[in-house]
Amino acid sequence: MFAKRSFLAALAAFALGLGAVGATRAQDYPSRPITLVVPFAAGGPSDAVGRIMAEGMRGPLGQAIAVENVAGAGGSIGVGRVARAAPDGYTILVGLWGTHVVNPVIYTLPYDPATAFEPITLVASNPHLIALKKDFPADDLNGLLAWLKANPGKASLGHAGAGSPPHVAAVFFQKLTGTSFQYVPYRGAGPAVQDLVAGHIDMVIEAPVPVVAQLHAGLIKVVAVVEKTRLAAAPEIPTVDEAGLPGFYLSNWFALYAPRGTPPAIVRRLDAAAVTALADPTVRARFAEIGQEIFPAGQQTPQALSALQKSDTEKWWPIIRAAGIKAE
């Protein structure tokens, strides 16, 4: 009996010691530079979000944050890299709607985005725009819907690949409106919008950055914002609710994640640094320049990120599965 009690006492002391070590590590965090993995190539919106946040969080954390681009398979290679990383707060991730909601449906993944990470915070989102070539025979959303219904299968829509937000948005658009049109896949938003300007395709549902400049140059038409609120960069564009298609919402959100098992104190430290960065006027201006809308302060929490990921999964998985969307 004495030996058993001694063993249990030693075990308890060991556990307390581990807890103390963990608490000390969290208290001292960060003591060296942090790696922020962006699961797409440099130059895209995910990379821009990552670099703005890395710069903005450097001051509050007191350490450099190095951006590492790990692209491939719709972002799943970079996401997998972080899923396998040590849960010590020194490797974190820019995750987004595509990597954490869409990819589990269209790829066979070696990790589960719902359980492989500790959510840190929501960062920003970019609503999409319904844009038409300049000489398309419609000038507003109701006119577009009327033309599509009168000409089934004749229009063409460009998108940035299977499972991309524009592709999923187009599938949802067809489902809501009872219309049909041809899909034309591209390697990215830029080439698709270039072909829209050239008149080679009829429409896109795309993020603001490649679209708004062409709109202001008078080279294309934009009939609606695929969101509940108007876009600050182009406030003249009506929302889908105002234009005649209520409920057609899609916003590609960006967030920060850490590997599962990262100590809560470290997650809180990272969240606090992100909140501080997102309140900085310089950071806010940089996000506005690339068409990103920062989440309200009340949503810059692990809980809000977890809830949004769950609700979007419940909304979009049935739509994606019913459409038979698979990775190319």
Image (cartoon, rainbow, N blue to C red):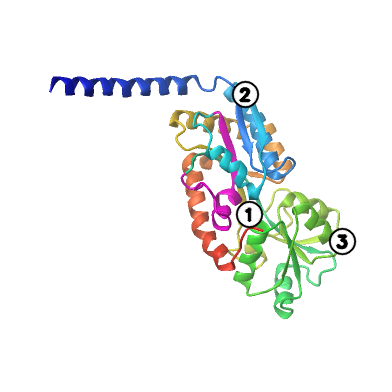
Q: CA distance from mark 1 to mark 2?
A: 32 Å
Instruction: Give above or below for 22 relative to 243.
Output: above
Q: Amino acid at mark 1?
A: Thr
- Left/right of residue 314 with respect to residue 58 in the rendered view: left
Discs 1, 2 touching: Cβ within 8 Å: no
Discs 2/3, front: 3
- Whether the magenta-drawn stretch holds residue 263 is answered as no
Identify the residue at the far bottom of this view.
150
- Residue 113: x %, y % from top left: 51, 47
- 237 up-or-down from 5: above or below: below
Q: Residue at x 59, y 67 (%)?
A: 323
Rendered image: mark on residue 198: 3
Relative to 147, residue 265 above or below: above
What residue is disc 1 on? 229
In percent of width and height, residue 74 lies at 64, 50
Q: Position of residue 160 (x, y in %)?
A: 71, 56
**Secondary structure under badge 1?**
loop
User: Which badge, 1 or 3, is on the more N-terminal residue?
Assistant: 3
Query: Residue under circle 2?
Result: 59
- The quadrant of the image that shows the C terminus is bottom right
Q: Secondary structure at mark 3?
A: helix
Tell me the magenta residue range.
Answer: 90-115
**Which amino acid, mark 2?**
Gly
Closer to viewer: mark 1 or mark 2: 2
